[in-house]
Amino acid sequence: MLLGRMESPNRVTFYDPIQEAIDQELVRRKSEFTSNHQLSIFVGTWNVNAKAPGLEKLSPWIDPRQEGEPAPDIFAFGFQEIVDLSAQQV
């Protein structure tokens, strides 16, 4: 009950005056430590399928820009199944 994890639909809410004061001060001073910039992000995932490196060219996928387009500010890649697959790993 003290953790707010009850079976009933009524949740327990604790009032924390210190945290509320901190939150208010952070909101008041946010211009001191934040800034806004427009960014472009390239995000991609690739299922390697446990293939050995070098069997497929990743260059077109990693940098799919058309000629003259600016590069993204952030690249984020996710790879799946980089290890050899065995019966247990499947």
Image: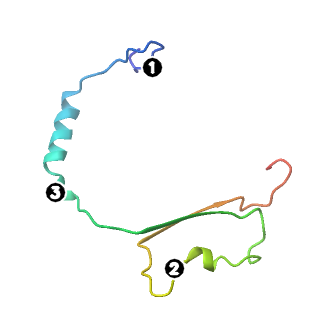
User: Do tag 2 and tag 1 residues touch (Cβ < 8 Å)?
Assistant: no
* Distance of label 2 from label 1 (alpha carbons): 49 Å
Question: In this rendering, is residue 26 above or below 79?
Answer: above
Q: Which residue is mark 3?
A: 31
Task: Tell which circle, 2 or 1, labels the residue nearer the N-terminal end.
Answer: 1
Query: What crowding class fits label 1: few (fewer than 14 Cα within 10 Å), some (14-19), or many (20 or more)?
Result: few
Residue 36 drawn at (x, y percent): 25, 63
Q: Which residue is mark 1?
A: 5
Residue 59 drawn at (x, y percent): 62, 79
Tell me the amino acid under the disc marked 3: Ser
The image quadrant that residue 62 belongs to is bottom right
User: Do tag 2 and tag 3 residues touch (Cβ < 8 Å)?
Assistant: no
Task: Tell which circle, 1 or 3, labels the residue nearer the N-terminal end.
Answer: 1
Which residue does the image show at 31% across and 21% down from the upper left? 13
Tell me the amino acid under the disc marked 1: Arg
Residue 40 drawn at (x, y percent): 40, 69
Residue 38 drawn at (x, y percent): 31, 67
Q: Which residue is mark 2?
A: 65
Task: Tell which circle, 2 or 3, labels the residue nearer the N-terminal end.
Answer: 3
At mark 1, the secondary structure is loop
Residue 47, labelled with which disc? none
The image quadrant that residue 24 belongs to is top left
Query: What crowding class fits label 3: few (fewer than 14 Cα within 10 Å), some (14-19), or many (20 or more)?
Result: few
Tell me the amino acid under the disc marked 2: Arg
At mark 2, the secondary structure is loop
